[in-house]
Image (cartoon, rainbow, N blue to C red):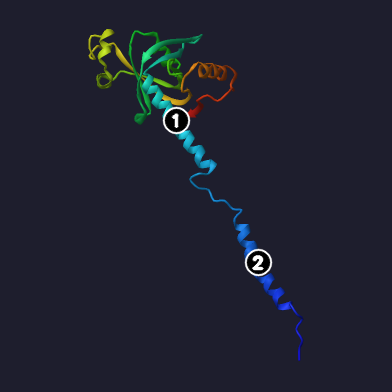
Amino acid sequence: MTTRKPGSTAGRTARRTAAPKEAASSSKLAIPKGRNSPETQGKKDLASHVDRVWELAKRIGICMFITWDGERQRARPLVATVEKQNHAIWFLTDVEGHKDEQAERFPNVTLAFADNSGNKYVSITGKAEILDDRALVSKLWPPYAKAWWKNADDPGIRVIKVTPRDGELWDSSGGLFSRVAMLAAAVTGHGPKIGDNARVSL
């Protein structure tokens, strides 16, 4: 007769059943990427900032159109027609204006939008193109343009198309403290977070 040592079978059984528990606990270390992962959240924030740049530019509507004349920067206020769906910002201009010549020679331009009362600012850089397109002039023609031209058929009217490349926004809820904080961030590159500041490719 063979004599079994007490507890030997139980020991082997305990060791056999311990393995699945160890495997189960190790499997918990692998965290799958989901809708709330940092990578996914980062993409959502980027898309939100891109949309906000377009939204603020359209809402503000008037920008400083900044060109380069070969020696220095030149800026003038222009009314912008912002069309995110066409990835374009349009302006009506006169063929006799210096900005047309400057944009043709040096097509990289900057558009600066400012809502001082709301503490919201947008800067967009892009490539400008001068177009002599009568149908497009008629499409973009606003009533206030009569202050400069008799009608949309004026042969001196040109269209400037800007294709945005990148942008930056400063978006605050308002208030004196927020304004000072945003100015400090703009000057120093860092500061208290009062609202959003983001650079994006468009």
Q: On the image, which quarter does residue 113 sit in?
A: top left
Left or right: 26, with 109 as reference point? right
Indicate the amino acid at tag 1.
Val
Residue pictured at 54% horizontal, 16% vertical: 180
The residue type indicated by label 2 comes to Ala
- Identify the residue shown where x is 65% and y is 62%: 22
The local secondary structure at tag 2 comes to helix
Q: Position of residue 153 (x, y in %)?
A: 22, 14
Callout 1: SS: helix
Q: Is 142 situated above or below 39? A: above
Outermost bottom residue: 1
Image quadrant for the C terminus?
A: top left
For label 2, the residue is 19
Residue 34 point in image, percent of width and height:
50, 47
Horizontal and vertical percent for residue 119? 46, 18
The 10 Å Cα crowd at callout 1, few under 14, some 14 to 19, many 20 or more, is: many
Residue in the picture at 51% in, 27% down: 198
Residue placed most toward the observer, 105 or 41 = 41
Left or right of residue 26, residue 92 in this image: left
Measure how far apart labels 2 and 1 are at the Cα level: 51 Å
As drawn, the label of residue 50 is 1
Foreground of the two, 92 or 29: 29
Image vertical order of residue 26 relative to residue 62, above or below = below
Of marks 2 and 1, the one in the foreground: 2
The disc placed on residue 145 is none
Q: Mark 2, residues whose alpha carbon is within 10 Å: few (<14), some, or many (≥20)? A: few
Image quarter for residue 96? top left
Q: Position of residue 181 (x, y in %)?
A: 55, 19
**Quadrant for the N terminus in the image:** bottom right
In this picture, residue 157 sits left or right of residue 101: left
Camera-nearest residue between 33 and 153:
33
